Amino acid sequence: MRVVQKYGGSSLATPARILNVAERIARAYREHGPLVVVLSAMGDTTDELLALAREVSPRPHPDALDLLLSTGEVVSIALMEMALRDRGVPAVALMGWQAGIRTTPSFGRALIESVESARLERHLSGGKVVLVAGFQGVTAEEEITTLGRGGSDTTAVALAAALRAERCEIYTDVDGVYTSDPRVVPKARKLTHVTYDEMLELAHLGAVVLHPRAVELAKRYGVPLYVATSLDDREGTWIGGEAQDMEGGRVVTGVAVDESVARVTLRGVRPPEGALKRLFGLLAEAEINVDIIITSAAGPDGLDVAFSLEAGDLERAIELLAARRSSLAYDRLDAEGGLAKVSVVGAGMASRPGVAAGVFRTLADAGIDVKMVSTSEIKISVVVEREQARRAARLLHTAFGLDDEAAEAGGTPSPQGERREA
Ligand code: ADP
Ligand code: ASP
Ligand code: MG
């Protein structure tokens, strides 16, 4: 039986935590034999490296930045190899390139193209625990890349898929996937099972507990995911193919919050013919991701278009649209930062009417202004002022019956607070 485990930064933040994880890996090794373990950088290392780079260079060159950021994970695997060997566990530490992780050359957000698993297989056959640095890979030109923030989850699932592992276990600082971020919604409940599609939506919509691309890969290759804490042995959450509770089950599974959203509104875009093609073509060329789009009917004054985007891209978008005003004529550009997206997700939503109505009623009754809306079969997202986002999430969590009444309002979930769903 093959297993891939992954330990996140908070699980490795101090030497004591590293030793704790070493004990857990040693135990897994004694129970199952050889396994692959993906490690993140210790604690806030990646943030610290980023800050360090910015002190040296205002706009660090992407390939040098990736080389720098990749060192965080290397520290973790080297320390873990030492700790495991001290425990009599045969371990070998591999950087991403040594583990055969080949990526595209998009520095800072590289995609895994393939995993050449021969070396991993050899070490596994040799009875070893193989420690792999998460978040990194190598291009065809042998340059080091990173996969984007939170990308160690994706490394773990990619290795699990390549090695046809029975499951991929993600160990972190929460003991599973909750109905909402327990730091935002204290009454959030732990879920025992989430479908790939629900998790994909939650992750894309701001639930950082799993990297969205990790969930995507897990779904594509049918790798069951298990999310649990590295701090004790409490039962975590399974992410897999099928909903557990069939037709009687939940309509809403969770509420996600993304607190870094911005909006751009262009008024009087002319000529209206082909305006959308030109506008979004420009943004795509600049690799600016657009999320929700709203357009007016074209009138004599041209077309009005509003779109939301990642707050970090706002400045670049404004610069770009101002610079291209000759090819994209418009009367006015309004930009708004400080927004957030709150989303209600549930596989049961597709066949139940009234969820959108419930969202709007709840927010209107609380005096929370909805600036944009987008829906899919299994989610409804609203853009609101950032200051109101957490309150909106808590209200929606309550309105859709997700609250854990045993959890103390205002507190963080207590160890007994993660009553499982019936
Ligand atoms: P790691 O360092 O282990 O990768 P992350 O910080 O990336 O950990 O992810 C864990 C965090 O995700 C939790 O501390 C929690 O605040 C946050 N989180 C957001 N949404 C959820 C959710 N729905 N369920 C559980 N945790 C969530
Ligand atoms: N260390 C990287 C980050 O902080 C990757 C990860 O932790 O998944 O984003
Ligand atoms: Mg993470």
Image (tube, rainbow, N blue to C red):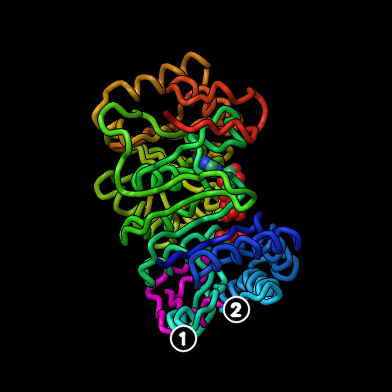
Q: Quadrant of the N terminus?
A: bottom left
413 relative to 113 in the view: left or right:
right
State the image coordinates of residue 365 (x, y, percent, origin top left). Answer: 48, 13
Q: Residue at x 41, y 59 (%)?
A: 167
* Marked residue nearer the N-terminal end (1 or 2): 2
Q: Going by the picture, which residue comes out furthest to the front?
A: 31
Q: Which residue is mark 2?
A: 90
Q: Quadrant of the C terminus?
A: top left
Query: Which of the 4 quarters of the picture holds residue 114?
Result: bottom left
Residue 134, relative to residue 243: is it above or below?
Answer: below
State the image coordinates of residue 19 (x, y, percent, origin top left). Answer: 71, 63
Rendered image: mark on residue 141: 1
The amino acid type of the residue labelled 2 equals Pro
Q: Is mark 1 within 8 Å of ligand 2?
A: no
- Which is nearer the eye, 305 or 235? 235
- Which is nearer the eye, 24 or 245? 24
Which span of residues is magenta-colored? 95-118
Q: Residue at x 62, y 69 (%)?
A: 73
